[in-house]
Amino acid sequence: MDYVNIALGKGRLAEKAFVWFEKIGICFPEYNKKSRKLIFVDETEKIRVVFVKASDVPIYVEQGAADIGIAGKDTLIESKANVYEIMDLGFGKCKFSVAAPKGFEEKLDRKRKVATKYPKVAKNHYEKKGEPIEIIKLNGSVELAPIIGLSDVIVDIVETGTTLKENGLEVIEDICEISARLIVNKVSFKTKNEQIYKIIKGLKNSLEKSI
Ligand code: PRP
């Protein structure tokens, strides 16, 4: 039997995903939060978990390097990967918001400068509102941009709100809710159907019980 490969983003979703794996009887004895290992295997169930950068999960699954992935809806929207989005896993809940330094006042004499790791989300949001913007694509520490004058506002993920608060920013507008999704490679869904279906069913049952 072939292994089923699951791509997980390093970070907050991964820890929660391992809790769910355990609930449905998939065990990775070597896993612990502090480990730097990137591959974990359940030899009994023939399941292999690989840790990748969270934003790369959709591409691993689209390309078939992983059969299944757990990715935030944020990375799915941004990647536009051609995969099956099977279900909302209900964890990793957060939202996309527009934030700005406290007391921010709009300057309407020029295009609003928006710093973000999510240019598609930002573009889409402001297009819907019919407001022209200039996007400044960053890869991290986005909160810094409006503080040091690189942008007027940011479009980013807000989970607890701590990062914004600690950097003197506040939400000025919410864009949409996001959460973790289970995604599956389109070919694997057929070729490894039985194994993948078993995982999906297990997760579905556990989720239903927890509601
Ligand atoms: C996200 C986001 C914020 C932070 C918000 O970054 O870009 O910086 O989380 O979370 P909070 O509301 O709970 O403070 P992440 O931690 O995913 O790191 P990254 O910059 O490496 O993507």
Image (cartoon, rainbow, N blue to C red):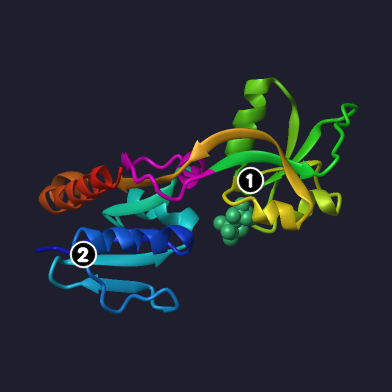
Does dot 1 land on a helix, a strand or a loop?
strand
Taking the spot 14% from the left edge, 51% from the top edge, the residue there is 198
Q: Residue at x 33, y 73 (%)?
A: 39
Residue 146 percent across, percent down from the top left: 80, 48
Q: Amino acid at mark 2?
A: Ile
Task: Report the quarter where the N terminus lies.
Answer: bottom left
Magenta residues, start to end: 74-94
Three-letter amino acid code at the position of disc 1: Asp
Would you say 176 lies left or right of 127 here? left
Q: Is residue 55 magenta?
A: no
Question: In the figure, residue 98 lies in which quadrant?
Answer: top right
Q: Badges 1 and 2: C-beta atoms under 8 Å apart?
A: no
Q: Quadrant of residue 47?
A: bottom left
Other-residue count near label 2 (Cα within 10 Å), few / some / many at <14 / 14–19 / ≥20 = many
Q: Nearer the viewer, mark 1 or mark 2?
A: 2
The reply to whether the residue tagged 1 has its Cβ within 8 angstroms of ligand 1 is yes
In the rendered view, does 129 fall on the left or right side of 200? right
Residue 100 in the image: above or below residue 15: above
Q: Residues within 10 Å of mark 1 (few under 14, many from 20)?
A: many
Depicted 44 relative to depicted 131: above or below: below
Label drawn at residue 45: none
Q: Quadrant of ligand 1?
A: bottom right
Q: What numbered label is drawn on residue 26? A: 2
Frontmost residue, 180 versus 60: 180
| Residue ID for mark 1 | 156
In the figure, 201 relative to 41: above or below? above
In front here: 39 or 104? 104
